[in-house]
Amino acid sequence: MSLQATTSQTVGPYFRIGMTWLFKDDLSGPGITGERVVITGKVLDADGHGVSDALLEFWQANAQGKYAHPDDTQQKSVEPRFTGFGRVPTGEDGSFRLTTIKPGSVPGPDGKPQAPHIVVSVFMRGLLRRLITRVYFPGEPTNASDFALGLVEPARRGTLIAKKSTQDNLALEWNVVLQSAEETVFFDC
Amino acid sequence: MAKLAGYRRPYPGTQPNHLHPPYVSSIKRAPSKPLICLPHTLSEVTGPLFDASLVDLKACDLTRQHKGEPLGERITVTGRVIDENGRPVRNTLVEIWQANAAGRYHHKVDQHNAPLDPNFTGCGRTLTDGQGHYRFLTIRPGEYPWRNHYNAWRPAHIHFSLFGPAFATRLVTQMYFPGDPLLPYDPIFNSTGDEKARNRLISVLDWETTVPDESLGYKFDIVLNGRESTPWEE
């Protein structure tokens, strides 16, 4: 019999004490290749109120679709300055902003390419376990054949795809909606 | 591309449900729709790795971050990080944060009427060694009131955050202290149905790391999700 993973507990309201040192909301920078993108949005609770004490962590491949990790054995090159990890807390109104580069495509379990995406962990007071979700990009033809989007009922797929922002034409908008008809799709583990 | 082994899913009952009504904050924040089971892909079996250049060696000693010594009982917290297959998780980042000895966090949201300690921030981090061991020197945190229900008090605890080798192994948890009389009343501790799993969050008094005339030692071992041994069939 294998051991059992330790039980998760909430980050609580005071995670900034231990986690601020690693906040990173800009993954782009000099010498990093790829299309620069800004993803903005809000974390919203059951009443539609912004969640002011949430933490989002992002993990993504570089513009070529290569993860900075030894288990990515694809014949593609890593970029030394691009780690692919972002950690962003929400502000008083529940908003967040991530500047990054659009990731390239990485393979799915069936060997077919996945549509470009960023995986996301959501932590906050009230969440006993993190929530896991993904951000996809608008107008991407491969979204239609993406393996993970295909697991989601069509009416809810839109919650995983960022939209062109109506306020900032250089930004994409993507919200984390915790409850309501528009609840974001969350994945198990 | 070689066949890819994913990480294990939780054993039933050993992880809390998202909605746990006695923990009132979960009511408006837990997802209301079922989660979708996503087989792990390259995106989930990779994850951020952190090396020694990022972590100050002194950051594991929470008692020496200021001019003076913090108030309270000095303790050593050590443990081993392994995966569900029993293998050590090496060089992985461990972050901790906690209240001071009086039960007050160094955070603007915490307005509990207990003194702040100018010599204690309550923030530490380290990397596990080649066998998965970690070690912190800190102050035993105090219990404190919270507004979850009438006369609610949190048992003493230290928050832990770990990454492991992959996005799929990320863990945030809390370590508790043996014999704490508040544990049976705490909705966060009791959010996990499986009693044995819950009780593994309680550290044990450890004579090996207890230093005579100096500090008590507590041991808290942590298990991260282990890799499935059977690769997927294509």
Image (tube, grey):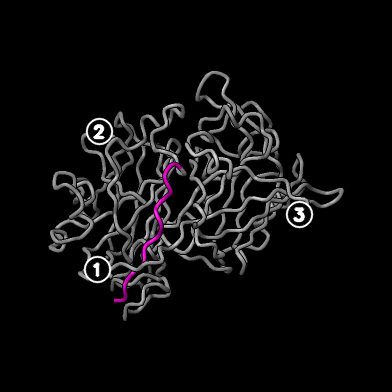
Residue A40: image x %, image y %? 30, 49
Gap in angstroms between the C-alphas marked 1 and 3:
48 Å
- Mark 1: few/some/many CA within 10 Å (<14, 14-19, 20+): some
Give the image quarter of residue B234.
Answer: bottom left
The type of residue carrying mark 1 is Ser
Q: Quick check: is B7 in the magenta stretch?
A: yes
**The residue tagged with tag 3: helix, strand or loop?**
helix
Mark linked to residue A105: 1
Mark linked to residue A180: 2
Q: Give me the residue at 18% from left, 60% from top.
A: A146
Gap in angstroms between the C-alphas marked 3 and 2:
50 Å
Q: Give me the residue at 55% from left, 30% from top.
A: B186
Name the residue beneath numbered marker 3: B209
Please state the extent of the stretch shown in magenta in the rendering.
Answer: B1-13
- Mark 3: few/some/many CA within 10 Å (<14, 14-19, 20+): some
Left or right position of B98 against B206 = left
What secondary structure is the magenta-colored segment mainly?
Answer: loop
Residue farthest toward the bottom in the current orientation of the protein:
A75
Give the image quarter of residue B185.
Answer: top right
In primary-sequence order, the first of circles 2 and 1 is 1
Left or right position of B136 against A36 = right
